[in-house]
Image: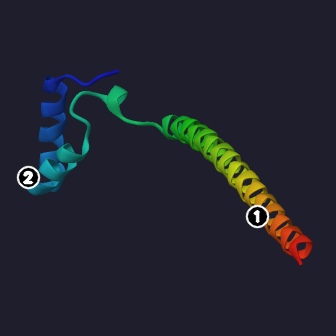
Amino acid sequence: MSVSEQERHELYIAVESAIGTEGAARLMDLLPPTGWADVTRKSDLNSLEARLSERIESQGNKLRAEFYKSQESQTRLIIFSLVSAIAVVAALAFGAVTLD
C-alpha cells in the first residue's frame, strides 16, 4: 500500500504538532518517498547473498581448475626437461668413456 502525497502531508502536520517542525522534517526524510515497495527486505538481501556466494564459489572452482591445469603442464615440462638433460649427460659420459 503506497502513501499518497496528501497522506504524507497530513502525517507531517500531525507529527509537526506533536514533536515540532525540525523533528517532523527529520522523520519525513527517513520515510521512503514512493512507498514501501522500493525498500529492500532482509529476504532480498539473503537471496542476493546466496546468489553471490554461489557465483564466487563457481569462479573459485574455475580458477582452481585453471591453476591445476597449468601446474600439471609445468610439471610435465620440468620432468621432460630433466629426463632429456640426464640423457644428454649420460650420452656424453658414455662417449667420454668409449673414447679413452
Which element type, helix, strand or loop, lies under badge 1?
Answer: helix
Density class for disc 2 (Cα within 10 Å; few <14, some 14-19, many ≥20) is some
In-image side of 34 versus 80 (left or right): left
The image position of residue 60, as x and y in percent, is: 62, 46
For the residue pair 80 and 34, the one nearer the viewer reads as 80
Q: Which residue does the image show at 71% across and 53% down from the upper left?
A: 77
For the residue pair 32 and 10, the one nearer the viewer reads as 32
**Which residue in the rendered view is the most extreme toward the bottom?**
100
In-image side of 64 versus 35 (left or right): right
Label 2, label 1: how far apart the Cα atoms are: 88 Å
Q: Which residue does the image show at 29% across and 22% down from the upper left?
A: 2
Residue that numbered label 1 is attached to: 85
Q: Tell me the kind of residue under disc 1.
A: Ala
44 w.r.t. 63: above or below: above
The image position of residue 92, as x and y in percent, is: 81, 69
In-image side of 40 versus 89 (left or right): left
Colour scheme used in the picture? rainbow
Which element type, helix, strand or loop, lies under badge 2?
Answer: helix
The disc at residue 31 is: none
The image position of residue 75, as x and y in percent, is: 74, 56
Q: Which residue does the image show at 61% across and 46% down from the upper left?
A: 63
Density class for disc 1 (Cα within 10 Å; few <14, some 14-19, many ≥20) is few
The image position of residue 53, as x and y in percent, is: 59, 43
Q: Along the polypeptide, which appears first: circle 2 or circle 1?
A: 2
- Quadrant of image for the C terminus: bottom right
- Quadrant of image for the N terminus: top left
- Give the quarter of the image for residue 8: top left
Residue that numbered label 2 is attached to: 21
For the residue pair 80 and 59, the one nearer the viewer reads as 80
- Give the quarter of the image for residue 59: top right
**Which residue in the rendered view is the most extreme toward the front?**
100
Q: Tell me the kind of residue under disc 2.
A: Thr
